[in-house]
Amino acid sequence: MQIVSVRDKRVKALVQDPTRTSVNGFNALQVRKVAEMIGAISVMTHPLQLLSVPAWRAHELTPGHPGKWSLWVTPNDRLTFHVDLDRQEVALLDYEDYH
């Protein structure tokens, strides 16, 4: 899927250059995980494909946020995004602190 908008500047840096090994504000583990997730999001055709990586704990944030998905990065942090299946687009890709 095409990523059409990114909210977090650290995530945006990894979307623009997935080969980066460091991003200001992320530790090395966060950079690696987020870069892997962005790669998977870019090639998926449906968000259910993300369930193939159990460690990411992929799930749709329903009922309050239909179409918004979450991936587990750290115990407190999630990579979230909205999916438009008809357009095959991911929007509002963000890095959020859930606690």
Image: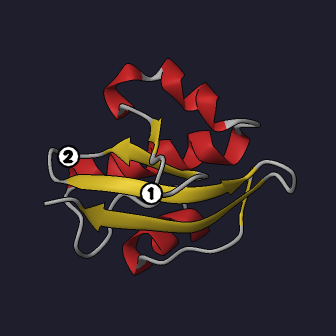
Position of 91 relative to 63 (above/below): below
Q: What is the C-alpha distance between the residues marked 1 and 2?
A: 13 Å
Which sits in the foreground, 82 or 14? 82
Task: Say what secondary structure mark 2 lies in.
Answer: loop
**Where does the C terminus fall, quadrant-wise?**
bottom left
Dot 2 amino acid type: Thr
Q: Along the polypeptide, which appears first: circle 1 or circle 2?
A: 2
Find residue 29 and report its horizontal and vertical position in percent: 23, 47
Residue position for label 2: 74
Q: Residues within 10 Å of mark 2 (few under 14, many from 20)?
A: few
Find residue 70 and report its horizontal and vertical position in percent: 42, 48
Find residue 10 and report its horizontal and vertical position in percent: 38, 73
Tell me if 31 is positioned left or right of 46 in this view: left
Q: Which mark is residue 80?
A: 1
Tell me if 49 is positioned left or right of 29 in this view: right
Residue at image coords 55%, 74%: 6
Contact flag, marks 1 and 2 (Cβ < 8 Å) = no
Dot 1 amino acid type: Thr
Residue lying at the far front of the rendered structure = 63
Residue at image coords 66%, 54%: 83
Q: Residue 34 carries which label?
A: none
Position of 36 relative to 92 (above/below): above
